[in-house]
Image (cartoon, helix red, strand yellow):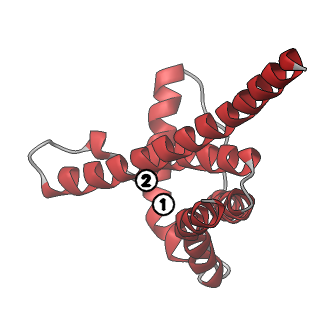
Amino acid sequence: MGFVSFVGRVLFASVFLLSAYQEFSEFGTDGGPAAKSLKPKFNLFVKQVSAGIGMAVPHIDIKSVIAFTMFLKAFGGLLFIISSSFGALVLLVYLAFITPVVYDFYNYDMESQQFAKLFTMFSQNLALFGALLFFLGMKNSIPRRHSKRRAAKAKTT
């Protein structure tokens, strides 16, 4: 069972690790294609947040955002492979930050093809988020079972 769990974690983390590697290899001086595709969506998101809170959001360089997301994916993925709860939390932060910005289906009409495509990708990232929450829940429930067994053994002796 331990080997199957390890293989599952490697396959799950490979989604994040390979994505981070691809972004790193294409990064360049301007942030690469990831920065070009994220910039208009990020600016729209910042504009909506500024309007929602009534204050101006400070300027954030898109290259810094891409570098930070690459770091979160790579670091979180590597820690997740070794069954670290912190790695799962890092990946959760990444997904919570990037999913609503990149897959902004809420900016499109429900009948458009773009809406359907973005909503599908948003749902897939939501499923990844749920899987990480499930991992954290299972990880936190295992020590409780062991401590109950130890307490039961201590009572019998």
| Farthest-out residue, left | 111
The 10 Å Cα crowd at callout 1, few under 14, some 14 to 19, many 20 or more, is some
Position of 148 with respect to 123 (left or right) is right
Residue at 70% across, 29% down: 145
Instruction: Count the labels in the image.
Output: 2
Where is residue 121 drawn, in percent x and y?
33, 55
In the rendered image, residue 4, in percent from the top left (x then y), is placed at: 57, 65
Residue 43 in view, yes or no: no
Q: Which mark is residue 38?
A: 1
Q: Position of residue 116 (x, y in %)?
A: 19, 52
Q: Nearer the viewer, mark 1 or mark 2?
A: 2
Q: Is residue 23 left or right of residue 157?
A: left
Q: Secondary structure at mark 1?
A: helix
Q: Secondary structure at mark 2?
A: helix
Residue matched to label 2: 102
Q: Amino acid at mark 1?
A: Leu
